[in-house]
Image: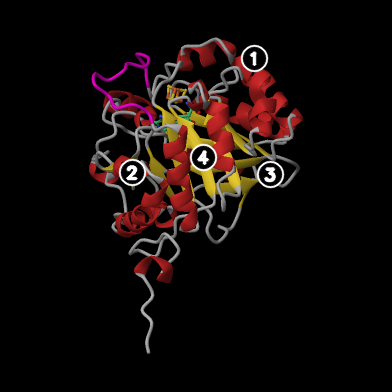
Amino acid sequence: MTVSIPARMAKSTLEDRHGRRFEYLRLSLTDVCNFRCSYCLPDGYRKAHGAPSNMSGEEIRRLVAAFAELGLWKVRLTGGEPTLRQEFIEIARTVAGVEGIRKVAVTTNGYRLAERAQSYADAGISAINISMDSLKPERFRAITGHDRLNEILAGIAACRAAGLSSVKLNSVLLKGLNDDELDDFLAFVVEHDLTLRFIEVMRTNDNPGYFAAHHLPGAYVSERLETLGWQKQARQAGAGPAIEYTNPDGPGRIGIIAPYSKDFCASCNRLRVSATGKLHLCLFGDAGIELRPLLQLDSQKNELVERLQRLVATKAPSHLLHQGNSGATPHLASIGG
Ligand code: SAM
Ligand code: SF4
């Protein structure tokens, strides 16, 4: 007698039709942010009229458990500013406690980080990316709307003292605004033995004029690194789209996230879910796919797992940024950058 295996058991991974496997979820906890980064929320956060509520801790637990059943093991909490969510610590602990989740990371603007780093580590967060777009206090204020550079520097030290195993910086390098700080960033990274990722500014629905004025291709950074003798690292199997460089003379690592570069999407290994429970197969895709109705009961898990598999299989091979199409994303805070 032949026994038929249910579709879900036969394939316990998340893959699309282009051979990409997804083991990494970027989960937004809120679209609220207290900063006003000039490329993201230049006028500050504004609540959309009639916006749905954020997923509860229980909904998040069910969501992450379904992904984990499909082999996903890393979750990054993001936003908006994820740490503004009142139940941030409880949610981080819940996600870290889901069977199969091996790494919980957070991306933060560093708000109140020095005083909170230990509580993040205690909740099970092991990796943190801190955004820092300038090493000059006045410029930092001009780009983010907040005079908090010193607070962020203290936060970096606190994360290390708290024993977080990975502490990285994110910087958006912007033509005419902070591109003259490239060498200062490199020196900072070497001095503090840090990893910094330069993110190429991305065009979203809200920022086309800003993008045209300040976009710098990732090649600007890679050319400088190569001139200074930094060494490009071979891509590890399963690694994300960052191009990594090491410093031959000592500590410090640089990553470059260049979404406009050729083949960027070929190594895509991530999925996104917005704070209100919409699956975004691409940061620059359409309005997102509603998952919330399947997050209401533990007994819906199998249905959710099957739906995730079916949806992920349809992920498009590439974004359409080169055609000037940045999808439906007004700004990255809206779905989780
Ligand atoms: N608020 C947190 C923060 O700033 O780290 C997390 C969310 S934020 C959307 C995540 C990352 O996206 C930050 O490093 C930010 O600099 C980056 N970002 C936001 N808008 C961007 C854009 N249009 N282009 C490139 N990076 C962007
Ligand atoms: Fe807020 Fe992060 Fe957007 Fe800056 S980049 S406005 S900190 S969500």
Q: Nearer the viewer, mark 2 or mark 3?
A: 2
Q: Which badge, 1 or 2, is on the more N-terminal residue?
A: 1
Q: Is residue 268 left or right of residue 96?
A: left
What is the secondary structure assignment of the residue under circle 1?
A: helix
How far across and how far down the image is residue 210, in percent? 33, 24
* Front disc: 3 or 4: 4
Q: Are marks 1 and 2 in contact (CB under 8 Å)?
A: no
**Ligand 1 appears in which quadrant?**
top left
Q: Which residues are magenta?
A: 41-54
Q: Look at the picture and state if 169 lies above or below 299.
A: above
Give the quarter of the image for residue 2: bottom left
Name the residue beneath numbered marker 2: 280
Can see residue 261? yes
Amino acid carrying mark 3 in the image: Asn
CA gap between label 1 and label 4 equals 25 Å
Where residue 151 sits in the image (x, y, percent)? Answer: 63, 15
Give the mark toward the camera: 1 or 2: 2
Mark closest to the chain's N terminus, 2 or 3: 3
**Few, some or many C-alpha atoms within 10 Å of disc 3 (few <14, some 14-19, many ≥20)?**
some
Q: CA distance from mark 1 to mark 2?
A: 35 Å
1 vs 4, front mark = 4
Horizontally, residue 269 falls left or right of residue 169, namely left
